[in-house]
Image: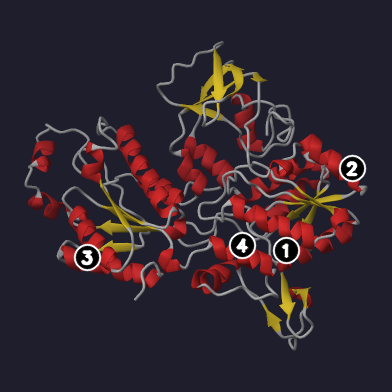
């Protein structure tokens, strides 16, 4: 995106002056509006030096660009999160992800050699220049862009048609197909739904579907402003801003991270400078007797109104194998989503048991594995001690190695979940931020954190290996809750007693929770 001009005026990763200015003022040091920092963090032990050339490669090790390093500077995670996300709550996916970024950023001129190769939907992956050319060919001076990471339903169609009519312009349907919110529908399925809508149900002479490989930050108001700026570079002069645009949902206290209108208000404050006017996403409902959609503000008390939220569509229809009603979504879209969404009892889930050493996590996990297998679920057990002998062999017990171990377990667990299995992870996992990072990998709705809250005294009494005693004598360093902290979960899905319940009782408590959440049939 930087190489093709999508992030213009930015053409390289932020240097220190630009980074500080973006955080504090939402502007580059030169004054140009830019609300989201684009940086290249490197590990603490990275050998990168000033004036050296660094190869930038993709995940397949293909060379994309060479950077001549002119700046190496430290950055502050908490400060960055507070400015960009408005919070340091580790339940925010970007805040959690930041914990794994290196403590120094590098910057310098880029020599771009190639851009990443994509083998899917190649005809829809248009650069800013190609997009502007296609829009010009459609012959309308005004263009309204729509950013989405979700499937489109009938209400979106209606909103897009009304937006295009209101400006007498073209619709730029511009879905993000980079990394989005954990748990979102995969982009392959989503793009199939977009194609159906664009080809069959939106005006062909006023619609352009183009994909943007943009990673979502879920940063709410700032991200909405950034999305508008990016769409300006693709040729739009109007932009649809939805309620809670780019919001990640609820924080650790169950409250929304951002207000419903904060994003729209911030973009409106800068729309004249941007040259991109806001088109609000007006809430609409279906009038059953008239078989049409209408803005909720225009509905009378006598109107028979039908509406389904996104959550209801998943929980009450797709996850129960029920087809979505035709007034809510097109049959073709419903069929695609039915292929994508498994019933809840066939979805993957990660059960993450955290607690002190000797709290009983492994025993509970083994019993839970048996119970789930007997219930017909496929289970993968990732026990912390076993993982350290295999997947994490060679890692020590420093903070960095502990985090690396947990991330490895989390990665494997997320793959199990993605393929519809149950991953049971039993690991001390002492640091809250890393656990929340793993939650993001699995998807918040498919992650069940279980706090095995056995008191320290009980854990020590169970310690047949004498590890606690060794730690208290100073013979073991970095031992949890003796000479290294344990950060208990703030809001786990389940907290297990004081150590007085048996392992079987605790396992059955978890099983009951999984039944309650729908992952196991009663």
Which image quarter is the C terminus in? bottom left
| Mark 2–mark 4 distance (CA, rounded to whole Å) | 32 Å
Identify which residue is drawn at 73% across, 63% down.
156
The secondary structure type at the circle numbered 2 is helix
Label 1 close to label 4 by CB (< 8 Å) = no
Label 3: which residue?
506
The secondary structure type at the circle numbered 4 is helix
Which of the labelled discs sits on residue 156, or is there none?
1
| Mark 1–mark 2 distance (CA, rounded to whole Å) | 24 Å
Where residue 52 appears, as percent x and y from the top left, is 54, 11
Of circles 3 and 2, which is in front? 2
Label 2: which residue?
136
Residue 354 visible at all: yes
Q: Earlier in the sequence, mark 1 or mark 4?
A: 1
Color style of the picture: secondary structure
| Mark 1–mark 4 distance (CA, rounded to whole Å) | 17 Å
């Amino acid at each position: 995106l930087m190489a093709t001009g999508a992030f213009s005026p930015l053409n390289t990763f932020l240097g220190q002056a630009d980074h500080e200015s973006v955080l504090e003022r939402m502007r580059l040091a030169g004054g140009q509006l830019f609300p989201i920092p684009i940086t290249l963090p490197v590990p603490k032990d990275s050998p990168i030096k000033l004036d050296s050339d660094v190869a930038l490669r993709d995940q397949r090790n293909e060379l994309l660009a060479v950077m001549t390093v002119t700046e190496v500077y430290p950055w502050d995670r908490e400060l960055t999160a507070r400015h960009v996300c408005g919070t340091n709550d580790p339940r925010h996916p970007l805040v959690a992800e930041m914990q794994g970024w290196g403590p120094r950023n590098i910057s310098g001129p880029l020599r771009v050699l190639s851009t990443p190769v994509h083998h899917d939907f190649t005809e829809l992956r248009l650069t800013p220049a190609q997009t502007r050319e296609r829009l010009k060919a459609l012959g309308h001076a005004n263009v309204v862009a729509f950013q989405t990471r979700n499937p489109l339903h009938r209400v979106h169609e209606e909103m897009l048609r009304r937006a295009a009519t209101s400006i007498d312009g073209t619709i730029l349907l511009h879905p993000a197909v980079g990394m989005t919110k954990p748990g979102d529908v995969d982009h392959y399925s989503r793009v199939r739904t977009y194609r159906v809508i664009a080809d069959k149900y939106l005006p062909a002479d006023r619609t352009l579907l183009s994909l943007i490989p943009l990673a979502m930050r879920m940063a709410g108001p700032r991200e909405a402003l950034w999305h508008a700026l990016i769409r300006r570079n693709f040729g739009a002069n109007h932009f649809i801003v939805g309620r809670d645009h780019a919001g990640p949902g609820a924080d650790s206290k169950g409250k929304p991270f951002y207000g419903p209108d904060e994003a729209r208000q911030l973009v409106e404050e800068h729309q004249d400078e941007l040259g991109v006017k806001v088109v609000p996403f007006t809430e609409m409902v279906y009038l059953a007797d008239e078989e049409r959609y209408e803005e909720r503000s225009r509905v009378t008390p006598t109107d028979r109104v039908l509406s389904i939220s996104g959550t209801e569509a998943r929980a009450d229809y797709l996850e129960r194998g029920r087809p979505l009603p035709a007034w809510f979504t097109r049959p073709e879209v419903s069929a695609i989503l039915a292929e994508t969404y498994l019933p809840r009892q066939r979805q993957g889930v990660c059960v993450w048991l955290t607690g002190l050493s000797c709290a009983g996590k492994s025993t509970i996990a083994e019993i839970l594995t048996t119970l789930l297998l007997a219930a017909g679920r496929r289970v993968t057990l990732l026990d912390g001690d076993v993982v350290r002998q295999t997947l994490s062999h060679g890692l020590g017990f420093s903070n960095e190695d502990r985090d690396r171990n947990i991330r490895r377990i989390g990665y494997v667990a997320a793959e199990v979940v993605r393929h519809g299995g149950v991953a049971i992870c039993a690991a001390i996992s002492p640091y809250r931020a890393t656990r929340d990072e793993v939650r993001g990998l699995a998807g918040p709705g498919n992650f069940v954190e279980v706090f095995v809250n056995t008191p320290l005294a009980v854990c020590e009494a169970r310690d047949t290996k004498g590890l606690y005693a060794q730690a208290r004598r100073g013979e073991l360093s970095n031992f949890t809750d003796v000479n290294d902290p344990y950060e208990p979960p703030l809001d786990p899905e389940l907290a297990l007693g004081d150590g007085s319940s048996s392992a079987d009782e605790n396992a059955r408590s978890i099983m009951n929770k999984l039944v309650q959440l729908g992952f196991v049939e009663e």
